[in-house]
Image (spheres, rainbow, N blue to C red):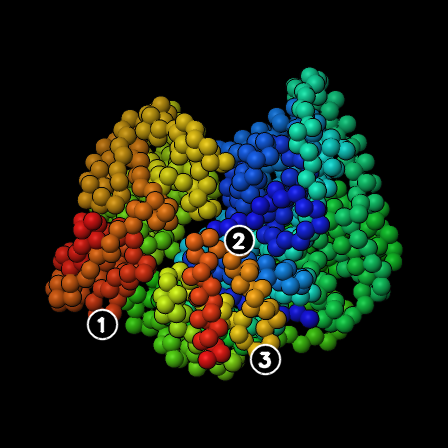
């Protein structure tokens, strides 16, 4: 049993926290876990991707064509890793664009979010999430990553239980922000479950 | 952030660890007493983690001024009988090589481990050298972990090996080991209280004058021969004989090979090497005698491949004919090479290209980064200039639209290269640009050289009060040590003067007009000039509460000179300055309120921000 989760976004969005929470939850569930992430220069506002493999994996990288779930914290970043998506991939995508500085003032700039979601839908079952609005509702725009984690946890077949994920969140975020983050998690779940 | 206590003494506990944290834990389990490092991706988290628990355990952890110093501190500690570790990125080992190249002659006393974190694929480096070659050059053993658990276990094994053979040991990791995560089962921590270091004087061993070294070299070569035999019996190497053909593999690729064998459903013999220098020849010989053909799977250089081929067996040795010698491996690259080697059917996943054009998102200087203001101020001074650059966040100033960096080679090189440009006799003004931490690492001897040899250059020290690129480690200019205790900060102005600068000025880059004025003055003078541009890193500024209210755009004023909007604000390349409906737009979520866009707008269309607060 192996579940591959690819998390894509922009440096500074809190991807490393998500990979920590997922890994920790996997261990709490008695499962093996491996992953890989981006540090250093690539974090300076650049494209960032984390691989998390829950179950019996050896490689820290997901082989192309084998990602069961895609979590995109930014719409454009959702399209950069099409090669990685399995036929049955389910994606949760934050719908708030962060245009790269290179597109500012350019005619051929940032594609429309609708066009991005349409194209992604050809390769995956897509759940668009207004993570920014839900994060604000939870109490801080900084909880957008945890909103998306909540959404991921509600997807069909996702192996980690929500109670374990909540424990893992509580063990990984600053003490004062635990309640806020758990609210963000719940709002993310509801966005998928309805 | 609630962080895992890596000094928790619960043997058998399973934790989710970054490879580098596993190395730190392994060092603690081995009883390391002195740990030193200079930050560098992908190695930085090792010392950070040790420093975090050092006061509690009563051990010493430090950010050294550079890798040579770090290794030498560790050597002193080892001679004195304390287990020691020095951690650095691959190119850092070049800086430490002077010490390393002779260290094997003296050998060590207590265990000494040098962690070399290599960066195949150059995620955050200027080259992708394979430091196994340096282990061979320096005549020291090399161990290569392949995941988080082995990173911890091999670190501990490296200390034991080091002490057993009285040799420094290189623990060679790569980005996909150091920055990969996995579940790790913890071992026991030793009783630090019980250890008592003691130095036994022995000039014939520790004083490397020619007469002593001549005697030490044959001893070292003999030790290498013993190590080679030992390597063949090491538990860090594993052999499985199953198929007619064989694969030899080391490092992170061990995982890719295992998964590829499962995925292809093939039978193949496997020799997994964790102890890669000296090459375990006896073991390799046994392996070669049981296979018909062998494929060597190793990232970067054909380090094992060439040595195995040189063993003159009749077996065909393949490797770099099927796998690249540059970049990092991926699971699919390895699977395809194995399929071709075995001659089996293999269907790679379909290539998919997004039909939409995806604008690239390279790393950029952060919103509010004062390097941007400094670079833009330099552009304002209308003299022809050559920028000799250096290693750090500010290297990103080389990119569009600032393009304010003409060279970048290695730590400290800009200050020396600038002197070469000057002495070559070019017409342009020569400006060296170097960060605070980089200056203290390797720029100081270069500045002294400029004074000594009368180079007519301007050196700009970008002092953002931290080692920013690698994750905000303190340095000697900051007044804080690795463990967070206070220390005497070095004064950059006094330092520049002491090294011989004739003109020294300090500016705050976010005070844009004043910065332009000082740079104009500095560039109009002759002789050795130093300008220190001091402003805390914008990311630190957030924690320090230095961020200000974002400015506003007055749309009716945003019309630029003449007829079309001028877009001067876009030329600073700030991620927080966007463009919507033909007008500038401040992206408030990203803006730090530094006010640079306010300063550069020729039409006073962007107002507020800094002045308002």
B468 left or right, relative to A90: left
Pick the front one: B480 or B436: B480
Task: Tell me the residue at 13%/58% (across/down).
Answer: B603
**Residue named by callout 2:** B122
The percent coordinates of residue B531 (x first, y second) are 29, 35
Q: Is residue B300 above or below residue B479?
A: below
The answer for which chain carries disc 1 is B
Mark 1, Cα crowd under 10 Å, few <14 / some 14-19 / many 20+, is: few
The percent coordinates of residue A165 (x first, y second) are 55, 64
Q: Is residue A189 above or below residue B442?
A: below
Name the image quarter holding residue B90.
Answer: top right
The percent coordinates of residue B446 (x first, y second) are 42, 31
Q: Is residue B388 above or below residue A24?
A: above
The percent coordinates of residue A134 (x first, y second) are 39, 69
B292 left or right, relative to A83: right
B418 left or right, relative to B11: left
Task: Tell me the residue at 63%/48% (across/down).
Answer: B22
Q: Nearer the viewer, mark 2 or mark 1?
A: 1
**Residue named by callout 3:** A87
């Amino acid at each position: 049993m192996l579940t591959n989760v690819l998390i894509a976004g922009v440096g500074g969005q809190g991807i490393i926290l998500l990979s920590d929470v997922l890994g920790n939850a996997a261990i709490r569930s008695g499962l093996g876990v491996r992953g890989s992430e981006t540090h250093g220069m690539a974090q300076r506002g650049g494209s960032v991707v984390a691989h998390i493999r829950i179950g019996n994996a050896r490689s820290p990288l997901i082989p192309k064509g084998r990602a069961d779930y895609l979590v995109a914290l930014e719409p454009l970043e959702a399209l950069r890793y099409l090669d990685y998506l399995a036929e049955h991939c389910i994606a949760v995508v934050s719908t708030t664009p962060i245009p790269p500085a290179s597109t500012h003032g350019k005619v051929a700039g940032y594609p429309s979010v609708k066009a991005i979601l349409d194209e992604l839908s050809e390769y995956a079952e897509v759940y668009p999430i207004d993570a920014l609005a839900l994060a604000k509702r939870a109490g801080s725009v900084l909880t957008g990553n945890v909103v998306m984690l909540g959404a991921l946890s509600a997807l069909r077949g996702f192996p980690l239980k929500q109670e374990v994920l909540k424990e893992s969140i509580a063990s990984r975020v600053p003490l004062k922000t635990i309640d806020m983050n758990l609210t963000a998690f719940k709002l993310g779940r509801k966005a998928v479950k309805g | 952030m609630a962080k895992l206590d890596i000094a928790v003494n619960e043997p058998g506990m399973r934790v989710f660890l970054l490879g580098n944290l596993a190395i730190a834990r392994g060092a603690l389990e081995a009883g390391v007493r002195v740990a030193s490092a200079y930050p560098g991706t992908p190695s930085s988290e090792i010392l950070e983690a040790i420093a975090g628990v050092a006061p509690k355990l009563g051990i010493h952890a430090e950010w050294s001024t550079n890798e040579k110093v770090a290794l030498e501190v560790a050597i002193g500690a080892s001679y004195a009988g304390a287990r020691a570790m020095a951690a650095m990125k691959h190119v850092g080992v070049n800086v430490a090589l002077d010490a390393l190249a002779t260290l094997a002659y003296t050998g060590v006393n207590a265990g000494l481990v040098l962690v070399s974190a290599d960066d195949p694929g150059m995620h955050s480096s200027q080259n992708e050298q394979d430091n196994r070659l340096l282990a061979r050059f320096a005549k020291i053993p090399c161990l290569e972990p392949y995941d988080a658990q082995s990173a911890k276990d091999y670190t501990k094994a490296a200390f034991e090996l080091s002490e057993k053979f009285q040799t420094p040991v290189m623990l060679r990791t790569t980005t996909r080991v150091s920055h990969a995560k996995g579940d790790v089962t913890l071992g026991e921590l030793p009783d630090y209280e019980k250890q008592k270091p003691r130095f036994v004087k022995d000039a014939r061993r520790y004083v490397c004058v020619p007469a002593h070294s001549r005697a030490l070299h044959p001893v070292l070569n003999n030790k290498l021969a013993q190590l080679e035999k030992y390597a063949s019996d090491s538990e860090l190497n594993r052999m499985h004989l199953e198929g007619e053909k064989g694969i030899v593999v080391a490092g992170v690729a061990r995982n890719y090979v295992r998964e590829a064998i499962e995925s292809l459903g093939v039978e193949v013999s496997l020799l997994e090497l964790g102890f890669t220098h000296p090459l375990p020849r006896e073991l390799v010989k046994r392996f070669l005698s049981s296979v018909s053909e062998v494929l060597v799977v190793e990232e970067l250089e054909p380090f094992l491949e060439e040595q195995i081929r040189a063993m003159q067996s009749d077996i065909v040795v393949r490797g770099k004919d099927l796998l690249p010698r540059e970049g990092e491996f991926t699971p699919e690259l390895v699977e395809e090479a194995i399929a071709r080697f075995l001659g089996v059917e293999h269907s790679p996943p379909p290539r998919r290209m997004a039909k939409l054009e995806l604008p690239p998102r390279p790393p950029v200087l952060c919103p509010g980064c004062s390097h941007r203001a400094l670079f833009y101020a330099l552009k304002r001074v209308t003299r022809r200039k050559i920028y000799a650059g250096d290693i750090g966040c500010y290297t990103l100033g080389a990119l569009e639209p600032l393009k304010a960096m003409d060279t970048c080679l290695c730590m400290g090189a800009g200050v020396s290269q600038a002197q070469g440009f000057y002495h070559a006799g070019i017409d342009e003004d020569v400006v060296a640009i170097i960060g605070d931490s980089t200056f203290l690492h390797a720029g100081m001897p270069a500045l002294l050289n400029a004074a000594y040899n009368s180079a007519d250059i301007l050196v700009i020290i970008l002092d953002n009060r931290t080692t920013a690129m690698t994750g905000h480690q303190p340095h000697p200019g900051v007044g804080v040590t690795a463990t967070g205790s206070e220390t005497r900060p070095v004064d950059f102005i006094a330092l520049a003067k002491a090294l011989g600068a004739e003109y020294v000025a300090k500016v705050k880059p976010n005070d844009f007009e004043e910065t332009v004025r000082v740079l104009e003055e500095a560039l109009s003078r002759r002789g050795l000039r130093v300008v220190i541009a001091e402003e805390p890193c914008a990311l630190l500024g957030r924690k320090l509460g230095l961020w200000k209210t974002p400015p506003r755009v007055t749309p009716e004023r945003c019309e630029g000179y003449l007829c079309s909007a001028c877009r001067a604000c876009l030329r600073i390349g700030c991620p927080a300055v966007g463009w919507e409906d033909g007008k500038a737009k401040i992206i408030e979520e990203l803006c730090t309120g530094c006010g640079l866009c306010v300063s550069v707008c020729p039409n006073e269309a962007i107002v507020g921000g800094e002045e308002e607060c």
